[in-house]
Image: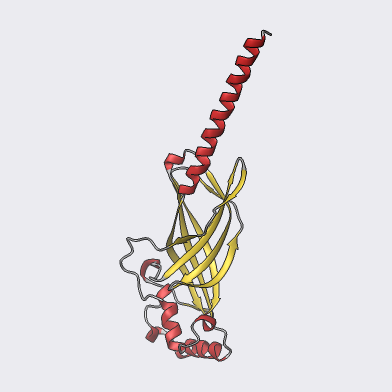
């Protein structure tokens, strides 16, 4: 092959590879625009008591109040919540993202409480939203030990808001890991996500 033609071919191949790499890097960069929001709460239990259909403390019976009081006497008042996170991969990305890992910390009124890690693959197609339920558990006595039993029940009821609204003061600090053709890419700094802004009927703040 003519040396000049060979050089031209090599240059053309290198240019194609460079442009392809640039396009891929642009797609990876766009993945950072995946949006995360707190969407709703679907389950709330305190000391094993289902609070989703309870609107006020006077709807609790003596047995249920007794369970809470006993749990507090043992300095262990478990609050179990299923908190739904909504993820939206913008259509402009033109590429599906795969969330393969997410470190999270539950924030209440700006202070860190419990932490955990979601380790399951969640495919995020471009232009679509996905629901990711997180099951969280914490000992209320550990974080609100200055309050009495009824105060803690009232706080727990705030999670069981109308239509599953996430209470004010609740947020998640997350650090997602997205799978790409270059391998897993972890967000450099944690992201603070809060409830949807349109929720005007949120109940008591923490």
Residue 47 as seen in the image, left or right of residue 90: right
Query: At 40% across and 71% down in the image, what residue appears?
Result: 169
Q: Nearer the viewer, residue 28 or 102?
A: 28
Q: Position of residue 156 (x, y in %)?
A: 45, 78
Q: Nearer the viewer, residue 28 or 194?
A: 28
Quarter of the image where one finds residue 165 = bottom left
**16 w.r.t. 169: above or below:** above
Q: Position of residue 134 (x, y in %)?
A: 53, 63
Q: Position of residue 191 (x, y in %)?
A: 48, 59
Q: Which quadrant holds the N terminus? A: top right
Q: Residue furthest left?
A: 200
Query: At 37% across and 78% down in the image, what residue appears?
Result: 55
Q: Position of residue 9 (x, y in %)?
A: 61, 16
Quarter of the image where one finds residue 155 = bottom left
**136 w.r.t. 60: above or below:** above
Query: At 42% across and 86% down in the image, what residue appears?
Result: 151
**47 w.r.t. 191: above or below:** below
**30 w.r.t. 106: above or below:** above
């Amino acid at each position: 092959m003519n040396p000049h033609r060979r050089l031209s071919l090599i240059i053309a191949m290198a240019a194609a590879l460079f442009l392809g790499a640039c396009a891929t890097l642009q797609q990876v960069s766009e993945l950072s625009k995946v949006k995360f929001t707190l969407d709703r709460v679907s389950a709330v239990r305190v000391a094993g008591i289902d609070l989703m259909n309870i609107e006020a403390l006077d709807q609790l019976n003596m047995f249920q109040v007794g369970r809470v009081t006993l749990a507090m006497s043992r300095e262990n008042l478990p609050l179990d919540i299923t908190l739904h996170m909504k993820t939206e991969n913008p259509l402009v990305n033109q590429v599906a993202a795969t969330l393969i890992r997410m470190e999270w910390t539950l924030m209440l009124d700006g202070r860190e409480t419990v932490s955990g890690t979601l380790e399951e693959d969640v495919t995020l197609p471009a232009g679509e939203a996905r629901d990711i339920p997180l099951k969280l558990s914490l000992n209320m006595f550990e974080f609100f030990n200055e309050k009495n039993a009824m105060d803690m029940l009232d706080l727990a009821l705030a999670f069981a808001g109308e239509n599953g609204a996430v209470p004010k003061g609740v947020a998640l600090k997350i650090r997602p890991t997205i799978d790409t053709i270059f391998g897993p890419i972890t967000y450099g700094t944690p992201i603070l996500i809060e409830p949807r802004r349109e929720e005007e009927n949120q109940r008591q703040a923490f």
